[in-house]
Amino acid sequence: MSSLLESPSLDVETGGSASPAARRQLTVALAGNPNAGKTTLFNALTGLRQKVANYPGVTVERKEGAWALAPDVPAARLLDLPGLYSLDAASIDEQIARDVITGRIQNLPAPDVIVAVVDATNLERNLYLVTQLLEYGRPLVVALTMFDLAQKRNLEIDMRQLASALGVEIVPVVVTRRRGLAALAEAVLRAAGKNAAGAGWRLSDEAEQELAALTGSNGNSLDRHTALRDLYAEEMPEDEPRRLLVREARARLSESNPTWWQEPLLARYDWIERVASRAVRSSSNTAAHAPTTAERIDRVLTHKILGPVILIAVMLVVFQTIFSWAALPMDLIDSGFGRLGEFVGNILPEGLLRDLLVDGVITGVGGVIVFLPQILLLFFFIAVLEDTGYMARAAFLMDRLMRGVGLHGKAFMPLLSSFACAIPGIMATRTIENPKDRLATIMIAPFMSCSARLPVYTLMIAAFFSTQKLFGFISIGALMIMAMYVLGILVAIGVAWVLKRTILKAPTPPLVLELPPYRVPNPLTILQMMLSRAWLFLKRAGTVILAISIILWALATFPRMEKPSQTATARAVEAGSEVDYHGEQLRQSYAGRAGRALEPVIRPLGFDWKMGVALISSFAARETLVSTLSIIYNVGDADDAGSDSLVGAVREAKRPDGTRAWTPLVALSMMVFFVLAMQCMSTVAIVRRETNSWRWPLFMVAYMTVLAYLASFITYQGGRLLGFT
Amino acid sequence: MLSIRTLNSQTEATGELSLAALGVGARARVIAVKGSGAVARRLMEMGVVPGAPVRVIKAAPLGDPIEVRVRGYHLALRRAEAQSITVVMTDE
């Protein structure tokens, strides 16, 4: 069998030279079931020369790369599609993949050649999509992956039989050893311009008659594909006269056969079984019954008791690692931006431009880029967990609990990701098929305490709680942080429960989830995922966050107050008057005025107008609370939450009447507010794009802010009633 | 060609029951997938069609969902979904 790998691919029709269509640039799409090895193949064919963008209107990633097919032809445009089980799409991911294959995406031509990626160890189910692609009739090549694994399982696949049954070329590939890649390129060049032969199965005479009527007299395979879809898909065709024809045809079919709609499904699998029985031989009879490797691993990983214990341990290790490993690079980035600020401050003359660059742009953007190491680490772990196949097990283990609040097992991973950042979490919800379940998951994702809240918690705890110990060894600070995480989770559960019973009422979502075989993760796939996520994150920091930083800086700077003295004497001015200058400037600024206007509203929460300014600025991004407080209290080192100077300034800050502005109770109230409030422009933007309307993001901001206000109010007023100050 | 799927002789001999009623380790053959909604379609697209052999591998820690092996791969589904799949028990 292995000799097949070295030989060039097996053509069905002999003759090897590239067809004339191959002289121009080809567009090639990789289509296949989830877990068929599509992304690994894509990375191997394109290296890291890829572009990642989004399809219009949704956040489904559009991955595209250049594939050098042969020295004398232009490199093909290779599209990696989201995994799909069927052209009759269930989730947004699948819809997009289908639309690309059938050329229904704006500004994207229908692919010249489709490469169907087929998992050799799971041939029958993978061939289902292939039967649909054959019906569709565009040029098709089958790449048979996991070929080596199939051999290990004693599955012998007769390539010639399979190729002649399908009527297209089949190229076995072993991506890790880069075998079969050149043969695949040759097969694609040969296939360009040659339509696939169509499907080898037929329906009952009655159904074939209806199909023929819908196909038209001189119909080709594409017309037959359209007729099949119109007649059998769940949704009706859009065209009104056509819809009438289809409705009548369906009525006639259902008269004689109540399960008429199953006919193509059954016919496809019937055909697949016949093809497989001829082309596949399992050399040992017991192979079909012996437990697979995945089953043996799952005896531990999805064990009734060990399974959940291991899941919790995995989560703990991931989060602990994200926080401890990221600390050093984060410090480096932080001090790097500090030095950059100093450098720019030194070379530029004093004035608005310098203030804008140093206090606005560098402080603002730096404060966000500092989270890059955490994002990279998080996606490293997510990619590893996904690529190994553990993610699906986590959903399997958690499904019952998630269902208790009306959510889907698949919502578990998006919510887990949201502990690092709600944005990737919300993007990860796109695997959830039902739109209402997806919306409910999106709506509660921001309650998971993300890494941007950590600087706020850290500052508050350093200032007011950390020195105390419970029973002499449990630090109050650690307990407080845990309490904040738990508070977020509990509120999320409550909100999901309410949403699923009111505006997002829907029957319990079904769960039909493949538990893929365990695999050694592919380093290139992981690296590629980390890089693309990091790039998306940096792009956001360079656009949204940059804009917000400039706006905030301007609001805190204008209208401008005259400096109390000339530059020459300013250096001699004592530190005290400098603080007064800053304080007065802030008071006078638009931001200060807004803070003072807000003061009556937030006073019941224990906050004064300076905290109001910080709150307003943190509605753009939570972590700006720390830098805003630094500016307000005029502490030099703006971004360092643990810095003694800011902690000291917060502790010492006074109200006009001389009492302390901050007390432990105020700090607690502030933390509770930050757990629940929607303070992240990027999240609002991503929800807007994800739901395609302003309704949901605005609703999210409104209800979360109301909840945060109420919870803070109860915390502060309740605390005072109990005698705390 | 579709008549192969009906399998009448077996149903009379052993009796039909739902996939959800099977214990861990049980082997069965699919007789029908009830319903006509998206779930029924998806189950069939994934190979759970009349005639296909299935085997219950395990249940999740809280008893639901269950894991079955069908066509050589592993599929997790809730008992509610398994309820709509009619099977007959088979021996080895």
Image: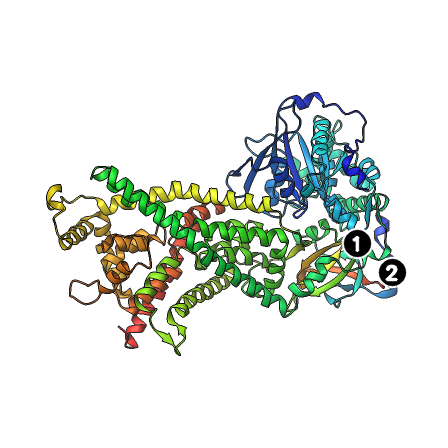
Task: Report the residue at 18% width, 43% height from top.
Answer: A560
Q: What crowding class fits label 2: few (fewer than 14 Cα within 10 Å), some (14-19), or many (20 or more)?
A: some
In the image shown, does A194 or A213 lie closer to the viewer? A194
Residue A556 picture location, percent across and down: 24, 47
In this rendering, the answer to whether A702 lies above or below A264 is: below
**Residue at 24%, 40% in the rendered image:** A346
Q: Position of residue A661 (x, y in %)?
A: 23, 64
From this view, report whether residue A603 is shown above or below residue A382. Answer: below
Check the image and tell me how it is coloured. rainbow
Is A370 situated left or right of A92 in this image? left
Tell me if I can see residue A563 in this picture.
Answer: yes
Q: Secondary structure at mark 2?
A: helix
Q: How many marks?
A: 2
Disc 2 residue type (three-letter):
Gln
Q: Nearer the viewer, residue A598 or A46?
A: A46
Q: Disc 1 marks which residue?
A: B50
Quarter occupied by residue A217 = top right
| Cα separation between marks 1 and 2 | 12 Å
User: Disc 2 is attached to a residue of which chain?
Assistant: B
Locate residue A472, reporting x and y percent. 39, 77
Which residue is situated farthest in the bottom direction here?
A471
Looking at the rendered image, the quarter that the N terminus of chain A falls into is top right
Q: Are marks 1 and 2 on the same chain?
A: yes
Residue A239 in sight here: no
Q: Position of residue A14 (x, y in %)?
A: 81, 27
Instruction: Indicate which disc, 1 or 2, sits on the residue closer to the N terminus.
Output: 2
| Residue highlighted by disc 2 | B10
Which quarter of the picture shows residue A144? top right
Q: Disc 1 residue type?
A: Pro
For label 1, the crowd category at 10 Å Cα-Cα, with few meaning under 14, some 14 to 19 and many 20 or more, is many
